[in-house]
Image (cartoon, grey):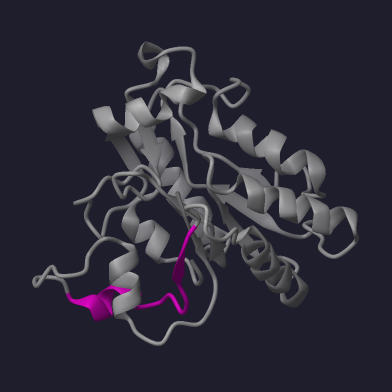
């Protein structure tokens, strides 16, 4: 797994490499970084645990701007970060009382209370340990009768909140960000996606069987993610 964390970068090419876009001649790399000031990738393959660095970046942001808007990722990558933030909160080093947050994605058909939903994951891994206000953390509506309208409403809610200040990201084994598989449009917005067989196999460890893994998700698009001010 990889984590993206907030720190200064010297070259725009770094971001293209993080997104798996290096070496693609048709890509205007400058466009990849427009509107987003910092990004870096840290390999967590047993060499270095970056959770403290990422936790510090979140804590520093909230110290400067208590009402910041956070983008929250799920899966195995951010768990250590959320534990670090819980520790900082217990020590009185950070407060989420004025902050808001938006989740990155969700499995279609899973209600928020489902034990494998990403909304419940965030509730159990982070919310219960810190002091978000009720309703301050918003997830995608993956059980809506009109998923396209639900995705459009989610985009509107992010915009109304002023956009995401800092987005946490995990990168899948095939390079997907959120549930945007390699080759996804850089301009894509929150939408419905079909999971690849590889991603379903990777996520089967969280379910009773491969057959239980949903085949469809709703996810922020690459364009939505790139609108965040920090990644």
- At 59% from the left and 20% from the top, the residue drawn is 114
Quarter of the figure with residue 22:
bottom left
In the image, the segment drawn in magenta is 28-43
Whole-percent x and y of residue 53?
A: 64, 67
- Out of 195 and 17, give the one closest to the viewer: 17
- At 50% from the left and 24% from the top, the residue drawn is 206
Q: Is residue 170 above or below residue 119?
A: below
Count of picture labels: 0
> Left or right: 109 with respect to 186?
right
> Left or right: 84 with respect to 187?
right
Q: Is residue 29 shown in magenta? A: yes
Furthest toward the left, the residue is: 26
Q: Is residue 57 above or below residue 214?
A: below
Residue 97 visible to the viewer: no
> Left or right: 3 with respect to 49?
left
Furthest toward the bottom, the residue is: 10
Residue 164 visible to the viewer: yes
- At 34% from the left and 65% from the top, the residue drawn is 18
Whole-percent x and y of residue 67?
A: 72, 65
- Out of 1 and 138, give the one closest to the viewer: 1
Whole-percent x and y of residue 79?
A: 62, 44
Whole-percent x and y of residue 187?
A: 26, 60
Q: Is residue 197 above or below residue 41?
A: above
- Out of 182 and 225, give the one closest to the viewer: 182
- Out of 203 and 44, give the one closest to the viewer: 44
Q: Is residue 52 shown in magenta? A: no
Quarter of the figure with residue 185:
bottom left
């Amino acid at each position: 797994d990889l984590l993206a964390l907030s720190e200064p970068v010297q070259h725009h090419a770094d971001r293209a490499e993080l997104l798996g876009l290096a070496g693609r001649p048709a890509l205007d790399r400058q466009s990849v970084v427009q509107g987003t000031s910092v990004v870096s990738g840290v390999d967590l393959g047993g060499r270095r645990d970056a959770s403290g660095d990422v936790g510090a970046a979140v804590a520093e942001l909230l110290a400067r701007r208590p009402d910041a808007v956070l983008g929250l990722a799920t899966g195995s990558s951010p768990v250590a970060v959320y534990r670090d933030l819980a520790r900082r909160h217990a020590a009185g080093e950070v407060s989420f009382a004025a902050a808001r947050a938006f989740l990155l994605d969700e499995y279609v058909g899973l209600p928020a209370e489902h034990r494998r939903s990403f909304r419940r994951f965030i509730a159990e891994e982070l919310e219960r340990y810190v002091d978000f206000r009720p309703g301050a953390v918003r997830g995608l509506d993956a059980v809506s009768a009109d998923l396209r309208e639900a995705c459009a409403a989610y985009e509107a809610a992010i915009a109304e909140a002023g956009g995401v200040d800092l987005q946490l990201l995990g990168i899948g084994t095939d390079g997907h960000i959120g549930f945007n598989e390699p080759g996804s449009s850089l301009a894509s917005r929150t939408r419905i996606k079909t999971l690849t067989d590889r991603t379903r196999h990777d996520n089967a460890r969280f379910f009773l069987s491969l057959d239980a893994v949903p085949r469809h998700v709703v996810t922020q698009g690459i364009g939505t993610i790139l609108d965040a001010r920090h990644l």
